[in-house]
Image (cartoon, grey):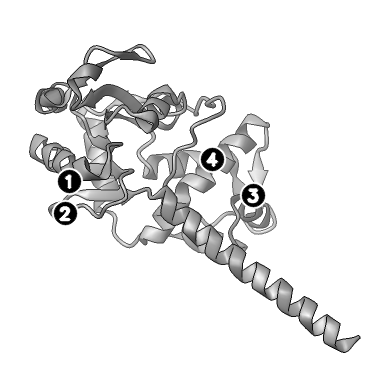
Amino acid sequence: MLVPELSGDPRPGPGMFRTFRETNVAEREFDARRARPGIPEATVARLPLYHRVLVGLADDGVGTVSSDALAGAAGVSPAKLRKDLSFLGSYGTRGVGYDVSHLLDQIGRELGNSLEWPVVVVGVGHLGHALANYGGFTSRGFRLVALLDADPSREGEVISGMTVRPVSDLASLVEQENIAIGVIATPVEAAQEVADALVAAGVRSILNFAPVVLSVPDEVDVRRVDLASELQILAFHEQRKTSAHLVRQAVGGVGR
């Protein structure tokens, strides 16, 4: 699950971004990466973690990093890290590790960071405001091009220098800006209707913050960010830790 960080100063990434429509070369590179088979979804989900750690290492002037150090910073096992990177054709050098700059560039290409992805956010409530004000999209290859809302009273409101537009403008915006990704930040009851509108306009990738499973065509990729569910998962683990602690206390009391 990919959850955007909504605080902190963005770090500039290496290299310059190209617009998705800039050259046929960029489009061919993108098509070639999509055509590459065999990278599991779980590995894809961890690539942004590795990329973020590598950006920090590069900023600190680190030239090489061991698999143990990189795995520890990313919160995974060294074996899992090495397996993940092997899908990218990167195996490192025994006794030396991975070249930070090369691996950063390699993962960035796989994630499409060398391109610039236009993004639209639909829904400008509290979450929509937070997303609009987040400064880290650009450094990761995303350009927020539009904020939309179905509430007529929000139309014309300026958020982070961007004017809120009606949802009826969606289709024309997708065509004009070549929007690749749509973000749904609406109440749950409006999410499916917004998803339908995004799909009808030609958007094929959706990040959904509404706690509902969307019905979309097979060719549309959807990532769901359900904060309440994540909190429930944490509560589950916390409950298990608490129960284990009480059991240990009880056993210790019996032994005395």
| Left/right of residue 97 with respect to residue 227 in the rendered view | right
Tell me residue 111's x, y (percent): 38, 43
**Residue in view at x 12 percent, y 37 percent:** 197
**Which residue is under mark 4?**
52
| Left/right of residue 158 with respect to residue 100 in the rendered view | left
The label nearer to you, 1 versus 3, is: 1
Marks 1 and 4 close (CB-CB < 8 Å): no
What is the spatial separation of the Cα atoms under label 2 and label 4, in whole angstroms? Answer: 32 Å
What is the spatial separation of the Cα atoms under label 4 and label 3, in whole angstroms? Answer: 10 Å
Tell me the tag on residue 215. Answer: 2
Secondary structure beneath dot 2 equals loop
**Residue in view at x 65 percent, y 47 percent:** 65
Secondary structure beneath dot 4 equals helix
The label nearer to you, 1 versus 4, is: 1
**Residue in view at x 15 percent, y 56 percent:** 218
Give the answer, above or below, for where 98 lies relative to 108. below
Task: Tell me the amino acid under the disc marked 3.
Answer: Ala
Task: Tell me the amino acid under the disc marked 4.
Answer: Arg
Of the two numbered discs 4 and 3 on the same chain, state the one appearing first in sequence. 4
Q: Nearer the viewer, residue 198 or 152?
A: 152
What is the spatial separation of the Cα atoms under label 2 and label 3, in whole angstroms? Answer: 37 Å
The label nearer to you, 1 versus 2, is: 1
**Mark 2 Cα within 10 Å, few/some/many (few <14, many 20+)?**
few
Q: Nearer the viewer, residue 256 or 16?
A: 256
Of the two numbered discs 2 and 3 on the same chain, state the one appearing first in sequence. 3
**Which residue is under mark 1?**
192
Tell me the tag on residue 34. Answer: none
Secondary structure beneath dot 1 equals helix
The label nearer to you, 2 versus 3, is: 2
Tell me the tag on residue 73. Answer: 3
